[in-house]
Amino acid sequence: MHIREKLPILFIVSLIIIAGILSIAIWKKLTNETPQTTAEIVKNIETMYGGEIIFFLAEDDQYKVQLQRNNAIYNLKIDPYSGKVLQMKQEKMDVTEKAEYLSETEIRKIVKEQYKGKIEKMTLNTQKEEPVYQIEIVNNKKETNLLIDALSGEVLSEIQAGVEQDSSIKSK
């Protein structure tokens, strides 16, 4: 084939390539999402995680947010278009920021003021969202299990049950 015979084919292929590139560019321009407003992002974060937003910055096609929740601070990176959380890291709490729990002595005093019986078991559970003391009180044939807030001393839960004593224990 001569060059004159290949020229129309080359021209048509070139037009198809140019048309394809232009159509992709136009499609991207028309479907380009607009970023969510800061108010929308703040509302979404507060709804999802609760807590209080203490810092907000739009940077590098991302929103950087600092959130305070349950005596901890979280750093979030958020996609401005979809509002999705891209990254979430909890800052290490400073020893001075750490909440102080009521002592076992203070908890025993609170329990003795409100309940009769002997405290059989007392455990501080800090694994939950809010730290609590788990307490077991026995009075005659009645057992009471309490959950007490380790920060405020407030009784969160009280469950009463009868104590079944094993006869083999009595005989020993």
Image (cartoon, grey):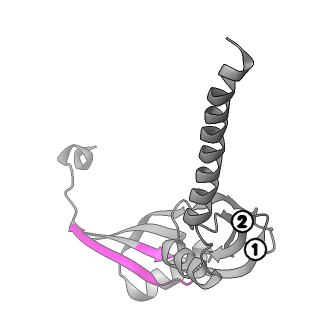
The relative height of residue 157 versus residue 22 in the rendered view (above or below) is: below
Q: Are the two marked residues, 2 and 1, in contact with CB atoms closer than 8 angstroms?
A: yes
Looking at the picture, tell me which residue is in the foreground, 87 or 50: 87
Which residues, given as a range, are shown in magenta?
147-161
Residue at the image position 38 percent from the left and 72 percent from the top: 146
Residue at the image position 60 percent from the left and 62 percent from the top: 85
Residue 140 x %, y %: 25, 71
The relative height of residue 171 versus residue 34 in the rendered view (above or below) is: above
Residue 159 x %, y %: 28, 72
Residue 65 visible: yes
Q: What element carries label 1?
A: strand
Q: Give the amino acid type for the residue marked by disc 2 in the picture.
A: Gln
Residue 111 occupies which quadrant of the picture?
Answer: bottom left
Q: Is residue 43 left or right of residue 86?
A: left
Residue 57 part of the magenta segment: no
Mark 1, residue position? 58
Q: Is residue 57 left or right of residue 35?
A: right
